[in-house]
Image (tube, helix red, strand yellow):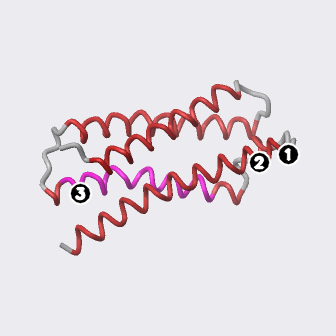
Amino acid sequence: MEHLTTLKALHVLATVVLLGSALGLAIWTWLARRKGDATAPTRLMQRPLVFVWLLMGISLVSMPFTGWWLVHLIGWPLGQTWVLGSSVIYTLGAFSWFWLLARVNRLRTEPGAGSPKFTLALAVFSGVCFIAIAGLMGAKPV
């Protein structure tokens, strides 16, 4: 039973780190743009912020493993609608997050490349996906 509690804590911690890091980056970018800093998008991949992106990536990669392990330990069938739905939403959110990371890195190397509205749309879509998954995990409609 101790494994289950530890695993739940790790899974929730990964979710909190992912959403908290994303919120921190969003607030930092918003405040920088509000102050009129035109170099904010190019600074999103500098050394201190890369640590935040790395934390988000580690959390993102660990979530499917800890989630599957939790479902296995508890004994829920993988065919439940909320488990399948969260898996599909996770896949879409993870792909959009990786695409967002590539776009932000491209903005660092080529300022002015790409549409900032599309980059914002990717960030919002990814965030909504992970918030929806957190809602599904919290509600657990069995």
**Whole-number angstrom distance, CA of label 3 to CA of label 1:** 45 Å
Q: Looking at the picture, which amino acid does disc 1 mark?
A: Lys
Q: Residue at x 17, y 39 (%)?
A: 80
| Disc ID at residue 69 | 3
User: Is residue 72 placed above or below 2 in the rendered structure?
Assistant: above
| As drawn, 38 above or below 73 | above
Q: In this orientation, which residue lies closer to the viewer: 19 or 61?
A: 19
In terms of depth relative to the viewer, which is nearer, 44 or 81?
81
Give the alpha-carbon distance from disc 2 to disc 3, as whole Å.
39 Å
- Secondary structure found at label 3: helix
Report which residue position mark 2 lands on: 31
Residue for badge 1: 35
Which image quarter holds the C terminus?
top left
Q: Residue 14's x, y, as percent?
A: 43, 58
Q: Which residues are magenta?
A: 51-71
Residue type for callout 2: Leu
Q: Position of residue 102 (x, y in %)?
A: 60, 37
Answer whether labels 2 and 3 touch (C-beta < 8 Å). no
The residue shown at (47%, 56%) is 58
Image quadrant occupied by the N terminus: bottom left
Q: Find residue 98 and report its horizontal and vertical position in percent.
A: 52, 39
Q: Earlier in the sequence, mark 3 or mark 1?
A: 1
Q: Secondary structure at mark 1?
A: loop
Task: Assess whether mark 1 and mark 2 are in contact (beta carbons under 8 angstroms).
Answer: yes
Q: Is residue 39 left or right of residue 3?
A: right
Judged by depth in the image, the label closer to the viewer, 3 or 1, is: 1
Q: Quadrant of residue 85?
A: top left
> Residue reaching furthest bottom?
2
Label 3 CA crowd tier, 10 Å (few <14, some 14–19, many 20+) = some
Along the horizontal axis of the image, is 101 left or right of 27?
A: left
Q: Is residue 64 magenta?
A: yes
